[in-house]
Image (cartoon, rainbow, N blue to C red):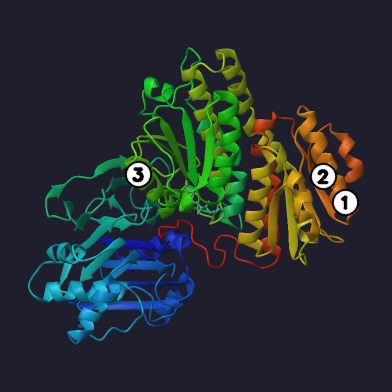
Amino acid sequence: MCGIVGYVGEKQAQDVVIEGLRRLEYRGYDSAGVALVADGTLATEKRAGKLANLEKAIADHPLPPATTGIGHTRWATHGAPNDRNAHPHPGADRRVALVHNGIIENFAELRAELETGGHLLLSETDTEVAAHLLEVEVESGADLTQAMLAVVRRLEGAFTLVAVDAQDPSRVVAARRNSPLVVGIGEGENFLGSDVSAFIEHTREALELGQDQVVTITRAGVSVVGFDGTPAVGRRYHVDWDLSAAEKDGHDWFMRKEIYEQPRAVADSLLGRRTPEGHLHLDEMRLSDQELRDVDKIIIIACGTSFYAGMVAKYALEHWTRVPVEVELASEFRYRDPILDYSTLVVAISQSGETADTLQAIRHARTQRSKVLAICNTNGSTIPRESDAVIYTHAGPEIGVASTKGFLTQLVACYLLALYLAQVKGTRYGDEIDQVMAQLEEMPGHIEQVLAAGQTVYELAREHVDTRAVLFLGRHAGYPVALEGALKLKELAYIHAEGFAAGELKHGPIALVEDGLPVFCVVPPQGRDQLRDKMVSGIQEVRARGARTICLVEEGDDAITPYADVVIRLPKVPVLLQPLVAVVPLQLFACELATVMGHDVDQPRNLAKSVTVE
Ligand code: AGP
């Protein structure tokens, strides 16, 4: 949800900022803009649409040289995505410029106050209000840091603000409340970014900021204060991936690259989880064994794809630990007045660690004395920081807006959590846990095998270029896979796609089936014969009504062939782990279909990677 960059140093700020925006564009691509401080004035350019439009505008009308600057790539909240509403926004006298991620909730009253005082606001954004207020402060003599402190105390809502003052090229100042911001620490230069990919090609040293803090970067250093003005210190850390992880590596899309990275990502997420004695060990698990033994209910909260990972987790957690599990959409959670207490473990799953719905849900859970464990892919992000414990997935940066390796590694983290709880609570014998761990360790090889057969799925996708609707059916752990397959198709191919629990079909959705409708069927492994047999009946029912059945079936299960128009083979794996292989062909299908339809796979319309507004 909006990408923000700030730079002060010796390099050309325009180059650093534009390059940073390119890496952050996945966060929002409704418009982009830069502001540079050059010879006591602001030089700005901004354009609706993708970053390429801004780059073209700058190529046509070059900006002056400058070594201090800020930039923004927008996912619109207040005001249409046009040039006028694009950031940066200047103050009334064009002395300060400001970029913003989030929502300023009391902007209407602040705007009215400014307009009464004679300010002419040019955009429909909440951001411009903050720019005007900031400029009022600097014009009355405050330095930019003091001015920012004065302004943030007046703002309500969630925001990251980053600003420059034309009369002070030595600094860039930022503020953070409930919205992401990290500092990149360089030599003779410093950076600000919504995440570390903004500056990864310049430095891998980063500083994590807390809530309600203002940070000032200069060439010489970084200083942090709380909104009340008291000095604060951030947590410094080293980023363990480099620029190559943020590049496409010869693939046409980040998403495709990320799909093919899944065997590695799953292997990395399993790495170092066992002691030499063979015990499971989760080093970021900050909850004691006794606290975990006291857990008598688990509530999983998440959004989108992460929610589907949570649905799979329920099967594994309940089966291996016998603890009841609820899975809830984070955006709904706190509004139903959930029953929580100290013995409830809330598990928040979030790839980005910044999703506002999930963040607000965990805050609610903590006020009810529940322990919160985060499953997250982004070191230093807000959700793990505000949780009692965290299991980091090790997928590396996920740039494609559609989550792929994020999902698979979330599944791995959920299995690890379930097995760890089973170990601590004694609900599974050690050798049973060993057996599942061994099966998990074989999964990267199985995923490779599915990817190796990718061409068949690509051809299938190309045959469906004129398709306007697709259904997905699954049962048990295959049901969330069906939902995820449908979500991938909706977000990438803009096709009407629905996932159903196969048993539910006859209660209504079967009315949607008509001649030629493609129906993907995730068939459970033969080992679960009852489940599988019921699935086969479901397949027969839709086929009898004209559906074109595309069946994902484990190798050796030939009984399904008479009812399948297309068979996609899956490796033989246990039913609870099947989502790790079954979802892969669905990802490939969506990626390829969207490609042949001519859509932007990495930046689908109306979406943003990290949704930092509720
Ligand atoms: C998935 O492809 C999505 N684009 C989206 O549903 C995502 O999973 C959701 O917004 C949650 O994000 P998070 O995992 O970063 O919290």
Question: Mark 2 or mark 3, which is nearer the start of the sequence?
Answer: 3
| SS state under label 2 | helix
Q: Name the residue under label 3.
A: 380
Question: Mark 3 or mark 1, which is nearer the start of the sequence?
Answer: 3
Q: Residues within 10 Å of mark 3 (few under 14, many from 20)?
A: many
Q: What residue type is labelled 1?
A: Arg
User: CB under 8 Å between callouts 3 and 2?
Assistant: no
Q: Position of residue 498 (x, y in %)?
A: 69, 56
Label 3 and label 2: CA atoms lie apart by 45 Å
Q: Which amino acid does label 2 sit on?
A: Gly
Q: Name the residue under label 2.
A: 538
Q: What residue type is labelled 3?
A: Gly
Q: Where is residue 592 in the image (x, y as percent from the top left)?
A: 69, 57
Q: Residues within 10 Å of mark 1 (few under 14, many from 20)?
A: many
Q: Which mark is residue 543?
A: 1
The answer to whether 373 is drawn above or below residue 72 in the figure is: above
| SS state under label 1 | helix
Report if residue 72 is visible in the image. Answer: yes
The answer to whether 90 is drawn above or below residue 214 in the figure is: below
